Amino acid sequence: FAKPGRAGLSFGAIAPVDAEVDAFTVPAGYTWSPIIRWGDPLFSRTPAFDLNAQTPKAQAEQFGYNSDYLDIVPDPSGKTGVLVNNHEYVNPDLMFPPSADAAELRRRGDIYKAAQGMSVVEIRRKAVGDPWTYVVDGRRNRRITVETVFEMTGPAAGSDLLKTAADPEGRWVHGTLGNCAGGTTPWGTILSGEENFNGYFAWAADTAEQKRYSGSSTTSTSTGWEAYDPRFDAHDADYVNEPNRFGYIVEIDPQDPTSTPRKHTALGRFKHEGANIHVADDGRVVAYMGDDERNDYLYKFVSKNRISGSRRKNMTLLTEGDLFVAKFSGNSPAAEITGTGALPSDGAFDGTGTWIPLTRNGASAVPGFTLEQVLVYTRLAADAVGATKMDRPEDVEPNPVTGKVYVALTNNSRRSAVDETNPVTGNRYGHVVELTETSGHSGTTFGWSILMLCGDPNSFGNAYFAGFPKELVSPISCPDNVAFDSEGNLWISTDGAPSTIGYGDGLFKVPLTGAERGHVQQFLSVPRDAETCGPVIHDREGLVFVAVQHPGEDGTFAAPRSLFPDYGSTAPGDVATAPRPSVVQVHRA
Ligand code: FEO
Ligand code: CA
Ligand code: CA
Ligand code: CA
């Protein structure tokens, strides 16, 4: 559709906001409004949100909780479109008062199942450039929940490792869990990462494979599903494989509310943060992905087939191809990587790297692993080939203007042995790596450098912003989601600033070229205890969208710490009191 307005988005950076301030703060000349909030009805038959009368049925037709990945996908007219949003997890203590009643806890458990997953909601506006409103009863409106049926695709679909009593074929899985970041494909589907799926299962952690994904043995979870739904009790012999059916990249078609969503085993199984695609010069599609765990890995998938004009064929591209994991090498002497973040004598944390194949031409490339084992126990396969342990890879996204790939490494309290790619001991503030493919995006070699070492320069003297004068940047900590505007500027949203630099989380613009390279400028700050997710930058329209996840997370139902987004009454149980995770648009005042 027609793109009005100038590229880039001009604003004066906001001052950092104290973490205890419960406000959504935008630059002078801008204002904000929620598009849709937790509990807003998607259909006219859906009950209005009532915090004290919530039911599983109502929640399954209302907007879900804890918004994360977001895209705003306009139709060709620019006046209608769809909003797609992930609902990563729930905060039971904010949604309900305490209860010890088993029947009530089970009823709530079904509400939690309905509040997670994903939402597709139609949006409309009078004119291109206007802010959007959501459409009740939109043709494409859809909730995907923990009971929606997904089809497994790729080489591990139908594998014994995926079979359960309820699904002897190993191909049909109810639900998606821990949906964190994601990406929108060139063919218009939405990819979403199943991240912290392990937290939904009672696990035995008997085997090396279970340990590598679950951490330790557990008997109860925060949602309580294992108490009445045996598939969340992996101690149950009938469902010992149920956790193997989560931890994938899922793909949904937001244009077709009757389509069956899919989980792609070819892209491996780990705590997938998200996936973002770049079309290589040879026409194959390359998906970049992070495993968000301390000391876990960076991956990419290269499709076997090439992109075409057929949307139907493009929707099969992620079912066949090769999976790689990254191994980084630094070019400075190890003695110069001191763990403090001080630059080595060549003035840069930088070097080269290789993509090590885990699968090749439809076969395992890892000795001792079958293809199915590589794709279901991907972390162990990557361990076996000596991949580089990273500081929690979150969003990994290719810049559509330059093709360079940006890796957000959010922090890593368990970073002890440093290397040039992860050079800070106990990495508190996180960093961002800029990666340049040197044999094409489908190739196996790359160069890299650290674009920025995050932190507040006033308290962390080795904070680094691509050489830009650090006294002029906005303090930033714990980079998580990334996005690009139409000029190719990097935008970073954060998760963890309050407990590390004492400011609220926010959204930051970072130019990547010219004299302004590395000039971090804060655009917005989210309310108390919230994380900034989603970001979508429609700079030519002067519109910025974010998902506000877990506002008031450190409070309780009776004692809320945030009144976002309605800032209404303070009576416990009043709808206007409840902090409501929401999708917000920022527009010119
Ligand atoms: Fe759900 Fe890695 O953040
Ligand atoms: Ca170096
Ligand atoms: Ca995230
Ligand atoms: Ca995070």
Image (cartoon, rainbow, N blue to C red):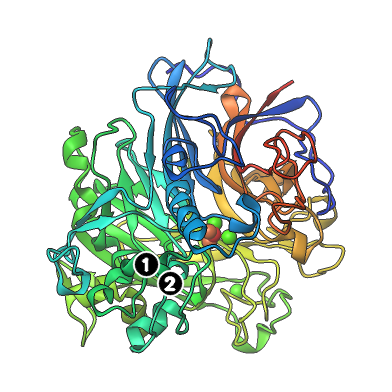
Give the x, y percent position of residue 143: 39, 39
Give the x, y percent position of residue 263: 27, 55
- Above or below, 319 against 268 in this view is above
The count of marks equals 2
Depth check, front residue: 120 or 322: 120
Beta carbon at label 1 within 8 Å of ligand 2 = no
Mark 1 and mark 2: span between their CA atoms?
6 Å
Residue assigned mark 2: 353
Depth check, front residue: 189 or 436: 189
Q: Quadrant of the N terminus?
A: top left
Q: Are marks 1 and 2 in contact (CB under 8 Å)?
A: yes
Residue at 30% in and 76% down = 377
Mark toward the start of the polypeptide (1 vs 2):
2
What SS does tag 1 mark?
strand
The type of residue carrying mark 2 is Gly
Hey, which quadrant is residue 414 in on the image? Answer: bottom right
Q: Is residue 59 left or right of residue 358?
A: right
Give the x, y percent position of residue 575: 67, 36
Hey, which quadrant is residue 297 in on the image? Answer: bottom left
The type of residue carrying mark 1 is Thr
Depth check, front residue: 16 or 108: 108
Give the x, y percent position of residue 289: 41, 60
- Residue 434 visible (yes or no): no
Residue at 75% in and 54% down = 468
What SS does tag 2 mark?
strand
Residue at 32% in and 69% down = 230
Residue assigned mark 1: 445
- What label does residue 57 carry, if any? none
Hey, which quadrant is residue 307 in on the image? Answer: top left
